[in-house]
Image (spheres, grey):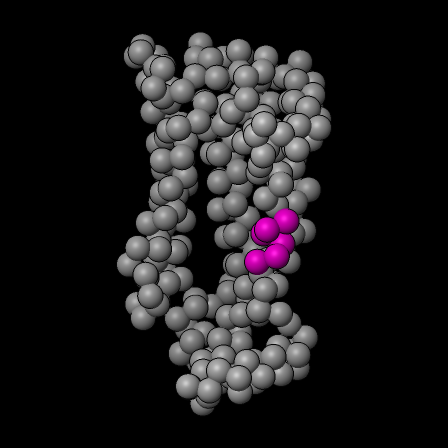
């Protein structure tokens, strides 16, 4: 029994919702619309995560100073950091917990589009939504899949550029971290077309949402230099 089986009741609800939309619009578009509606419902969590990240950036110079002041004295450093976050009524985990809360939805969508069901029998430009890259054998199939991967790659490129700007040269792994943005393209190559459509939609939503929530915010390097 798969560990994802506990999600089956939620998967059935998601299936019914997408099926209902597919009765009005093409199934591929129904996947896009359903994903967008759920991401809109999750937007308050993204706003909370953005607030937490902005707080961490604002406090970064003070955290760096405390690290220098209490170098080699972890107990005093921990106490000083706790006092800082208490004074600011903030938490070092404020930006992460809302993102973790989104994982169940992503897990439901992953199971919906990777478990055989009637939705995967529908098509996009004549290509079954359940098609994997390893199963493609016609020019039309490769064209549709290639266009999807190219679109995901374009969104990931924007994430790569943002990560390059946000990662300081002195951060361990700074040279590798931005390239993780392209992991979505690699992942899309191992899931059905329907899951790839979901990945494109949610990745594009995340990129647009992050750009909007962080508009006008100073770059991390500028904050650290303050």
Tell me residue 137's x, y (percent). 31, 11
Residue 82: image quadrant is bottom right
Q: How many marks?
A: 0
Q: Residue 148 falls in which quadrant of the image?
A: top left
Q: Locate residue 5, reporting x and y percent.
A: 62, 29
Task: Examine the rendering and report whether any part of residue 53 can be seen.
Answer: yes
Position of 41 with respect to 172 (left or right) is right
Q: In the rendered image of this protein, does residue 200 appear above or below residue 124?
A: below
Verify whether residue 100 appears in magenta: yes
Residue 9 is situated, as x and y percent measured from the top left of the image, at: 71, 28
Of the pair 25 and 193, the residue shown nearer to us: 193
Of 41 and 64, nearer the camera is 64
Which residue is drawn at the image coordinates 57% and 30% (left, top)? 2
Is 219 covered by the magenta stretch? no
Q: Which residues are magenta?
A: 96-101
The image shows residue 168, relative to residue 18, as above or below, that is: below
The residue depicted at 62 percent of the width and 41 percent of the height is 104
When asked about the image quadrant of residue 168, the answer is bottom left
Q: Position of residue 44 (x, y in %)?
A: 67, 51
Residue in the image at 32% along x and 61% along y: 173
The residue nearer to you, when weighing 16 against 215, is: 16
* Side of 46 where 74 appears, left or right: left
Which quadrant holds the C terminus? bottom left
């Amino acid at each position: 029994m798969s560990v994802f089986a506990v999600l089956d009741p939620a998967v059935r609800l998601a299936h019914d919702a997408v099926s209902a939309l597919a009765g009005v619009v093409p199934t591929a578009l129904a996947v896009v619309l359903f994903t967008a509606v759920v991401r809109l419902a999750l937007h308050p969590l993204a706003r909370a995560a953005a607030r937490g990240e902005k707080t961490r950036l604002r406090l970064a110079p003070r955290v760096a100073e405390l690290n220098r002041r209490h170098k080699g004295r972890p107990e005093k450093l921990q106490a000083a950091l706790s006092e800082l976050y208490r004074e600011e009524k903030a938490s070092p985990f404020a930006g992460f917990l809302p993102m973790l809360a989104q994982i169940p939805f992503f897990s439901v969508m992953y199971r919906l589009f990777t478990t055989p069901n009637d939705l995967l029998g529908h098509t996009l430009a004549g290509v079954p939504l359940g098609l994997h890259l390893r199963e493609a054998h016609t020019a039309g199939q490769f064209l549709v899949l290639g266009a999807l991967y190219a679109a995901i790659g374009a969104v990931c490129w924007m994430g790569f550029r943002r990560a390059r700007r946000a990662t300081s040269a002195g951060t361990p792994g700074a040279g590798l971290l931005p390239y993780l943005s392209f992991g979505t393209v690699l992942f899309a190559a191992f899931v059905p077309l329907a899951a790839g459509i979901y990945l494109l939609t949610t990745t594009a939503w995340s990129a647009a949402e992050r750009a909007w929530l962080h508009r006008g915010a100073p770059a991390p390097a500028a904050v650290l230099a303050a």
